[in-house]
Structure formats: structure tokens, C-alpha cells
Image (cartoon, rainbow, N blue to C red):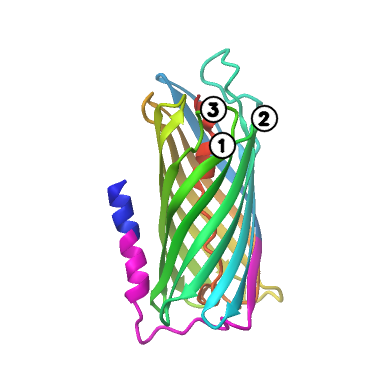
Amino acid sequence: MTRMILSTSFLALMAVQANSADVEVPANLVKSTLGHVSISTGRNAVRDVENGQHNDANPPIVDLNGSVSYAISENMLIAVDGAFRKDFFDEPRFDVSAGDEDEVSLDWQFMLGGHLLFDAGESSRLGVLAGYGDSRNAEDDAYSLVLLGAEAQTFVSNDLMVYAQAGYGNKVEGNSDDEGFQNGFFGRMGATYFYGDHTALNIDVEHAHVAKYLDGEDDGRFTSAFLNGETSLPASSLPVSLIYRVGYTSIDATTEGDYVEELEVGLGVKFTFGASSPRTAALSGRSLGMPNLPLRASHYTETLD
């Protein structure tokens, strides 16, 4: 946990100090409105491990994502984003322990986020974020939460942007009062490399921790790492990009030794307005989105309980 906080703080400090002379000033910050809508599909290889037993599933997944960023002054912008995901499990119960009626499959989740960002020199932005997320399983059990945090992003060169988010999350609603993402902390960091004018390659890493994840006592530690890509189609008359990803997620109820692992791949399309390329979109303040792990951990509460 300490290592995560130190690393995130380092990136935030770098965002204030890194102002290379050759970095382009963020384009059209005041007068432009920027945003995107995307849809993707893929497969998720899921393994649920409890008491030495395991159960596997490979559900199809669908993701919907969108954002809007708007400059409200010469050095300040606001951004709003939303993400929806549905996992299509074959059975209503994703069950390791035979006859355990508490084990239910995931169904859907969504997250809404808001960001307020300030210029910190010619190539960096600092800001705050807030979000609300909800998740449901096959029996419509809800685990909703709120997130509050800070974020930073900076172009360390014309082709490389680094960013970080860190903050606090807490459950609003849940099937049990002493389970879920309660009084937890999250950290997220990443780097995006812009290859020419049409391709962006991204690595995104998250970690989150909750002291009382299950039964009011089981420690929860959550980690994910994703490789993402976006390639715009210059020959198209529409501002369309191909998006693709591969990622790993671990949801670990460490006290009992129970955990869920996910390995997913996805492919989709993104429609962008207000920017001609992934690089221009980033320079103009396209939203980083919200951290995913707190909501994903909430999503698996009933599976691991």
C-alpha cells in the first residue's frame, strides 16, 4: 500500500514539474468540446477459487463507454464519463461450493464519473474526480459505491503521456452491511505512447485495498493490468477508431485464500468528436475515465462470500 501511494505521489509531482519546451500546448482548450462514444465486445476467462476448488467460465462481454470534456476557462476544464458492462454467463450461478445458494453469477455494472482539471504548466493537468457506480448479479443483488480522488497527467514528450489517479471509495448499498468495498483505497497509473498521428498504445495498472471485504473481517486486495490500443481510420469519412485490449484482474479475499481471476480480450469501435487523432484528443483533455477495480471488487462480493 505504501509503495502504491509513493509511486502515485511521484507521478503527481512529475505532472507539476515536467514542462518540456518541445511539448505542444494543449490544443483548443478553451473553445473546443471533446468527447467519444465506444462499444466493444470480447471474452472473459474467469476462474473462481475457494478452499482449493475452482470453477471456470468464459462469458462473452459487452462494454459501452462515453465521455465529454468542456473547457470552462483558459486553464480549467470539466469532464463527464460513463461506462457500462455486461457479462453473459451461461448459468445464473457461478458456483464452486455445490449447494451454496449465495453463489450467483454477475450480470451488469455501470460507473459515472466527473472530473475537474486545471492546467499545471504547458504540458500537465491536475484535478479531482468523483464517481458513482452500481453492480448487479443474476438475483439483482446490488453493490453500489462512491469514489473520491485526485488525478494528474503530463506529456513527458510529444509522444508519451503518463497519468495517475488515487483516492477513497465506500459502499453506498449492498446485500450485507459488513461486506463489499467499504472504506477502501485505490490507485491507478498508466502511460500512453502515441505512434504517429493515428495510433495510441496504453498500459494501465490499478491496485485497491479494503480491510473488511467479506464477513466484516476478510482483507481484500485487488489488482489489474491492461494493455489497450486505439487506431484511427484516416481513410474513413467518419471519426472512427478501432479499439482493442487484453487485461488481467485479480480479486483476492486474502484472509480466506479465496479469489477470482479474470483474463479478458476485447475489440470494438470508437467514435470521437472534437479531435482529429488520439494525440490531439489527449492534448485537448479527453477524460481518463474512472478506476475500475473498486466496482469490479464489489461485483464479485457475493461470488466469493
Q: Nearer the viewer, residue 165 or 89?
A: 165
**Left or right, 13 with reference to 82:** left
Please give the label number shown on residue 299.
1
Pointer 1 and pointer 2: residues touching (CB < 8 Å)? Answer: no
Is the residue marked by circle 1 packed among few (<14), some (14-19), or many (20+) residues within 10 Å? many
- The answer to whether residue 48 is magenta is no
- The answer to whether residue 27 is magenta is yes
How many numbered dots are placed on residues in this image? 3
State the residue position of label 2: 138
Q: CA distance from mark 1 to mark 3?
A: 8 Å
Pointer 2 and pointer 3: residues touching (CB < 8 Å)? Answer: no
The secondary element bearing badge 1 is classed as: helix
Q: Quadrant of residue 37?
A: bottom right
State the residue position of label 3: 303
* Relative image position of residue 43 (x, y in whole percent): 58, 42
> Which amino acid type corresponds to the residue marked 1 in the rendered image?
His
Of callouts 1 and 2, the N-terminal one: 2
Pointer 1 and pointer 3: residues touching (CB < 8 Å)? Answer: no
- Pick out the residue farthest to the right: 237
Residue extent of the magenta highlight: 9-37
**Left or right, 156 with reference to 292:** left
Q: Quadrant of residue 21?
A: bottom left
> Which amino acid type corresponds to the residue marked 3 in the rendered image?
Thr
Q: Nearer the viewer, residue 276 or 289?
A: 289
Is the residue marked by circle 2 packed among few (<14), some (14-19), or many (20+) residues within 10 Å? some
* Relative image position of residue 93 (x, y in whole percent): 62, 24
Of callouts 2 and 3, the N-terminal one: 2
Q: Is residue 118 visible?
A: yes
> Which amino acid type corresponds to the residue marked 2 in the rendered image?
Ala
Please give the label number shown on residue 285.
none
